[in-house]
Amino acid sequence: MPGPFVVPVQGDIELPKEVDCVVIGGGIVGASTALELAESGLRVALCEKGGIGQEQSSRNWGWVRISRRDPREIPLMAEALRMWDRLSARTGRDVGYNRAGIVFTCAGDKEFEEHARWGRLLKEYQIESRMLEASELRNLLPGSNLDVKGALYTPGDGRAEPQKAASAIAEAARERGAVLLTECAVRGIETTNGAVSGVITERGFIACKAVVLAGGAWSNLFCGRFGLKLPQLNVMSTVLRTTPVEDGPEEAVWASNFAIRKRQDGGYTVASTTSVVDIVPSSFRYARDFLPALRTEWRGLNFRLGSRFVEEARVPNRWTMDEASPFEYCRVLDPMPSKKSCELGLANARKAFPFLNKAGIAQRWAGYIDVTPDAIPVISAVDAVPGFHVATGFSGHGFGIAPAAGKLIADIVTGRPPTVDPTDFRWSRFSDGSKLKPMAP
């Protein structure tokens, strides 16, 4: 089956000769960046090689959560939660946002204690999060068969619709003056005296003094073309949506072997909690960078050596600006979903929530998550190329945090005081001797 249906956005025809900033990538982070910059009065062009929100921005679970986040992301996510509350009103379009709460179940005592630490982390943000004993969890989720010690429950967490959000934000950016250029790949940046002076697209040149790369799974390839090392690997996650069904929970639920969340259409998004890691040439290039993360996360990863290795080996890492780039030969990254993963996730979800036995499978899809060695994003200027900025590597956390990430990178571009301290997200951490590893909450 093809990827999910995304609310379509018609791109603009005319290529601007000059803008203040070009945003590369029309996912939810790129769209949020364009909206923030346009609202700041800058002339903005958003360039997307395919369609708005067609890749991981529309393929994720749709969770908007601060619970179980890396502590380094919490201040930014707290800002994102406030922004999601007003996002439909701000854009003038429904993004499906609902603060219905998220439940992270705990299989045993050790996991229960680990989750309990979240109370201390979130206190200063006035965000309610509490531990539930097994009996309390049964009361919260009547009809469930969860055999667990308890759960972390954060009522202020919620959900939104990935197939609507990026499109809504992009259209709002256009209403504020941004130009949306779909099927318009950026082949590269042009510099004058070492600083950004424009971008070369497949449709021509756009002069600018600032560029934000929000390219998701493509960011490593784009940076590598210009000699910039961005340690990033892509992890594939498979998702299914069910037909509409009654009697299910409003809250999203994570367990050790499945995750579910209610959809606006009355169905549920269901996923296995195991992701596929294709072994590709970059796996060897960045093996040392990712070794600490591998030691922490290996139980949730399924390594696979297959056709993807050959496919990525064939992609050129150098091209001239007057020829088609790899981005023009793959408008939408649409991997084949894992039927086995889907069936396993759904089977486990049905055991825990019998109401799902009445639901059919409406669609399956997969997407690639862009991951960094420390599992937090890069939201930063790149000092080696003045005017070049990167907002990528969200490591599966990008959908919920995107509005605030767009705001933060816009702060950096414009030079205004940042929304939160951006130090942890700096580009230079990959070369300044910092220890790159996921931080346990």
Image (cartoon, rainbow, N blue to C red):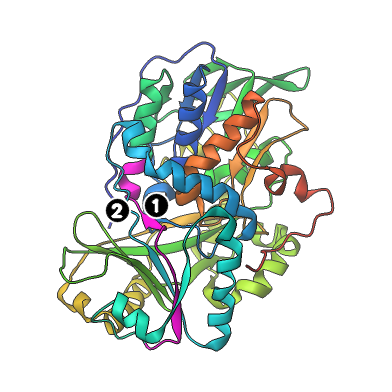
Q: Position of residue 159 (x, y in %)?
A: 35, 55
Q: Which mark is residue 309?
A: none
Assign the N terminus to one quadrant of the image: bottom left
- At mark 2, the secondary structure is loop
Question: Looking at numbered disc 2 in the image, what kind of residue is underneath it?
Answer: Pro
Q: Residue 148 colored magenta?
A: yes
- How far from the left and from the top, in percent, is residue 40? 52, 21
Magenta stretch: give its range: 147-165
Quarter holding residue 386: top right
Q: As drawn, is 367 to the left or to the right of 378?
A: left
Tag 1: Cα neighbours inside 10 Å, few (<14), some, or many (≥20)? some
Work out whether residue 88 can be spotted. yes
| Disc 2 and disc 1 in contact, CB within 8 angstroms | yes
> Is 211 located above or below residue 423 in the figure?
above
Q: x, y (%) of residue 49?
A: 45, 34
Between 426 and 48, the residue placed more toward the observer is 426
Query: Looking at this rendering, what residue extends furthest in the right direction?
Result: 433
Residue 203, how many percent across, how many down? 47, 20
The residue singled out by tag 1 in the image is 334
Quarter where residue 99 is shown:
bottom left
Rendered residue at 59%/77% (across/down): 114
**C-alpha span from label 2 to label 1:** 7 Å
Q: Which residue lies at the image location 50% right of the left edge and 50% below the top edge?
A: 398
- Mark 2 closeness class: few <14, some 14–19, many ≥20 residues within 10 Å: few
Residue visible at 37% across and 62% down?
101
Farthest residue, direction top: 17
The three-letter code of the residue at mark 1 reads: Asp
Residue holding disc 2: 2
Position of 186 with respect to 238 (left or right) is: right
